[in-house]
Image (cartoon, rainbow, N blue to C red):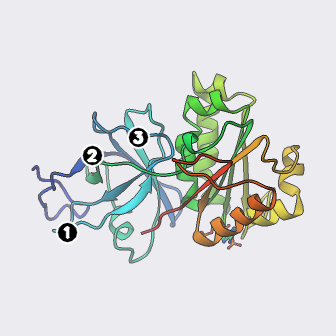
Amino acid sequence: STVATSAEGAQAFPIPDNVFAETVTEVRHYTDRLFRFRTTRPASFRFRSGEFVMIGLPNAERPVFRAYSVASPAWDDELEFFSIKVPGGPLTEYLQKVKIGDTILMRKKPTGTLVIDALLPGKRLYLLSTGTGVAPFASLIRDPDVYEKFDEVILVQTCREVAELAYARELYDEVANHEFLGELAAGKLRLYDSATREPYPRQGRITDLIDSGKLFSDLGVPPFDPATDRAMICGSMAMIKDTKDRLEHFGLVEGANNAPNTFVVERAFVG
Ligand code: A2P
C-alpha cells in the first residue's frame, strides 16, 4: 500500500488495499455550507450516472467513510462531488479543508437507485432535489443517455438561500454550452429552482409548489401523470417522504433496480 498526504498535511497514514486513493484536482466553495471538489478517476472505476460511493480521508488509522453521490457523468475522466460542510462533522469537518494535491479515499464499489435503469420508459423526467441532493442529478444531466431516453428533463432544486442555487445554475449553463451535450439537451433540459428563506423569482418548498400547482403552471406542463412522467427524488428524509407522498397521490409508484417503476428515491447524504 501507498502513503498519502492528509488534509492537515501533518501526518500520513497507510492506505488500505480495498480503496482507491485519488488526488484532488479542484476545490470550489460556493457558500459557508456547500462546496464541490474534483478528483482523478481510477481507470478501473466504472459506475452508472446517479450512483454513489463511499468517500474518506487518509487522516486516521480508521478512516471515516460517508456516502457521496458521484456528481460527474460516467464518461468524465475525473470524478466530481458536491458536499455540505457540517460543523464538527466526522468527515466534512476535514473534507471541507481539502486542497489541490490532497488524497481522497474511495471504496471501490458504487451503488444506488437513482439510475435510469430503475425507471420505466417515459416522456418527461423530473429530477427533484433539495440542497446537496442535486449531486446525483448533476451526473445525470451530463449523461447523453438521459436525452436519448426522455423528451424533457426537468431539474428541480430548492435551497434555503439563493447562493446555494449557484452550483446547479452553473451546471445547467455548462450543459447548454457543451459542444455535444448542448445539442442533445437543447429544448429538453429545463432548470426550475427555488429558494425558501430569501427573496427569489421562485419561492417555496417543492411540496408546496406541487400542492398549489405552481410548479406545473410555471413550467407550462400538465400535473404529474404516471403514463408519461418519471421522477427521481433526492433530499433529506423529510423531503423524500413528503415529495414521495405527492407523487403517489398522482399515481406514480416507487421502483428499484430490480423492479423498475415510475419514480425512485435516495437520501442526500450528510456527514
Ligand atoms: P425550508 O427553508 O422551508 O426548511 P436543508 O438545508 O434543511 O436540507 O433544506 C434544504 C431545502 O429543503 C430548504 O429550502 C428547505 O426548506 C427544504 N425542505 C426541508 N424540509 C422539506 C420537506 N419536508 N419537504 C420539502 N422541502 C423541504
Residue 166, horizontal then vertical, whole percent: 61, 51
Which residue is depicted at the point 53% across and 56% down? 30
Q: Is residue 113 left or right of residue 104?
A: right
Identify the image quadrant of residue 210: bottom right
| Labelled pair 3, 1 in contact (Cβ < 8 Å) | no
In the rendered image, the vertical position of residue 115 relative to residue 77, given as above or below: below
Can I make out residue 27 in this image?
Answer: no
Q: Which mark is residue 47?
A: 3
Mark 1: amino acid? Arg
Q: Label 3: few (<14), some or many (≥20) within 10 Å? A: some
Residue positioned most to the bottom? 88
Residue denoted by label 2: 23
Q: Nearer the viewer, mark 3 or mark 1?
A: 3
Q: Is residue 124 left or right of residue 117?
A: right
Residue denoted by label 1: 62
Q: CA distance from mark 3 to mark 2?
A: 19 Å
Residue 247, horizontal then vertical, whole percent: 75, 58
Q: Is residue 36 left or right of residue 104?
A: right
Give the mark nearest the N terminus, 2 or 1.
Answer: 2
| Labelled pair 3, 2 in contact (Cβ < 8 Å) | no
Q: CA distance from mark 3 to mark 1?
A: 26 Å
